[in-house]
Amino acid sequence: MNFATWPALLVVDVEGNGTNPPDLVETAALPVRDARPDKTTAGWWLTRPTHPVTPFATRVHGLTNTYLADKPAWADVADQVRTFLGNAWICAHHAHTDYRVLTAHLPDWEPAGVLDTLRLAKDAFPDLGTYSLDKLIEHVQPDLREAPGTRHRATFDAYATAQLLIAMASRYDTWDQLVAAAVPPGLPGGVLPSLARP
């Protein structure tokens, strides 16, 4: 895989307040350049939700209503997030979720394409059985020594997903092969059905 041929790509992860649909409380966007996650130019936003964070959500990501009380509302950072994302490709684990939440919060935004490391892992490791982020971290053993934050925080999960993407991408010869394996049906950037992997 020649990583120099990749278009602009951001690995994204979002954390919500636990409601359905969720209010965003944390958003991370991590550029991948030259086969490395680039923390120096990453975007990270903490936001105060319109509705309180549920106890369950706090148990998952550790973000409390008290901690978020002085953070900006989503409306105050939305333009900044939209500008940062631009029209780059995005990648996420179980990308339908992040894509759906982000497009709900940024109705005028559309990425060039969407890679899903969950879908990619099923193609790369067909016999693994389960494909949670924790399972893939255990199986691939990416270098997470420089990962910011902790598991279930957007910054850490985006970094881990980026490292998994890079590791799995090395199994493919071209960007087009990667796209065929990793873009979920119905999401931007997909290839023609005749070229897609089964």
Image: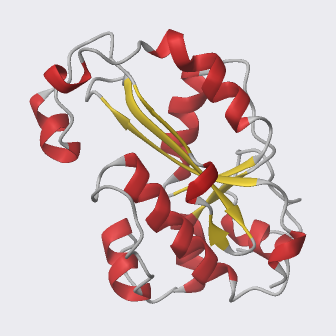
Quarter holding the C terminus is: bottom right
| Picture quadrant where residue 56 is located | top left
Position of the N terminus by quadrant: bottom right
Q: Horizontal and vertical percent for residue 184?
A: 65, 56
Q: Quadrant of residue 26?
A: top left
User: Which residue is most to the front?
Assistant: 40
197 in relation to 59, above or below: below
How does the figure colour the protein chain or chains?
Answer: secondary structure
Depicted 177 relative to depicted 189: above or below: below
The residue drawn where x is 83% and y is 66% is: 6
Residue drawn at (16%, 36%) of the image: 58
Q: Is residue 97 above or below residue 134?
A: above
Residue at x 16% of width, y 29% of height: 64
Q: Is residue 43 visible?
A: yes
Q: Position of residue 127 (x, y in %)?
A: 45, 89
Nearer the observer, 15 or 128: 15
Residue 125 in percent (x, y) is at 52, 86
**What x and y, as percent, mark residue 178?**
75, 73
**Left or right of 61 in this view: 20:** right
Q: Is residue 132 visible?
A: no
